[in-house]
Structures are given as C-alpha cells and as structure tokens.
Amino acid sequence: MSDVHFTMTPVDEKPIRKRGRAKGSRKYAQIIDAFLESEHRLVRVEDTGKEANYLSVRLKRLCKERSIDSVKVSVVNKEVYLETDDE
C-alpha cells in the first residue's frame, strides 16, 4: 500500500463562497460575440493562450448561460471550433 502525503490545517470556519461572474467571462464573451456578428458558419479559435479543452468548456458554459443554442463548440485535434446552424 502506498502512502498518501498531505497536510491538514485547522480553521475556525469555512470561507464565504464568492458569487458573480468569473473574472475571465468578458474575454470569452468577446469570442462568442465576434463569432455571432460574423457571417461565418464555422471558425477555428486560435491564439488564445488557453488549452483547447479548457477554452471549449468556458465557451460552452457561456453559451448556456446566455441561452445561445445556435452555437456549437467542439474540439478536434486540440483545436477549438465554433459553428452555427443558422442559415
């Protein structure tokens, strides 16, 4: 059996959970807004400095929060794609 190393620190109470928008939500909203304003049906999102899976989760969550059902976010070969079914 292998040992698990950890540290426990006594506390008096749990901290209050912060509510509100995540700090990065505006920058991801810019991506969605730019796509919706464009006339493109399919785009690859590049040069964000974020890992593809992380970025796709953030974009999907943002679309869900904003009730944007027309945008599909996907990851193919470690690249993020946005597409729409609107014609």
Image: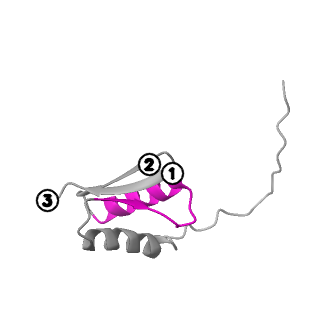
Q: Nearer the viewer, residue 70 or 48?
A: 48
* Residue 7 vertical placement versus 16 (above, below): above
Let me know if residue 27 appears in the view.
yes
Q: Nearer the viewer, residue 73 or 57?
A: 73
* Residue 76 vertical placement versus 45 (above, below): above
Query: Helix, strand, or loop for circle 3?
Result: loop
Image location (x, y in percent) of residue 59? 41, 60
Query: Which quarter of the rendering shows the N terminus?
Result: top right
Q: Are marks 1 and 2 in contact (CB under 8 Å)?
A: yes
Q: Earlier in the sequence, mark 1 or mark 2?
A: 1
Query: Which quarter of the rendering shows the C terminus?
Result: bottom left
Residue 56: quarter of image: bottom left
Query: Which range is magenta?
Result: 42-66
Residue at image mark 1: 53
Callout 1 amino acid: Asn
Task: Give how far apart the Cα atoms at labels 3 and 2 are.
Answer: 22 Å
Image location (x, y in percent) of residue 39? 23, 69
Residue at image mark 3: 87
Q: Earlier in the sequence, mark 3 or mark 2?
A: 2
Q: Earlier in the sequence, mark 3 or mark 1?
A: 1
Q: Nearer the viewer, residue 5 or 83?
A: 83
Query: Helix, strand, or loop for circle 2?
Result: strand
Q: Residue at x 56, y 56 (%)?
A: 51
Callout 2 amino acid: Val
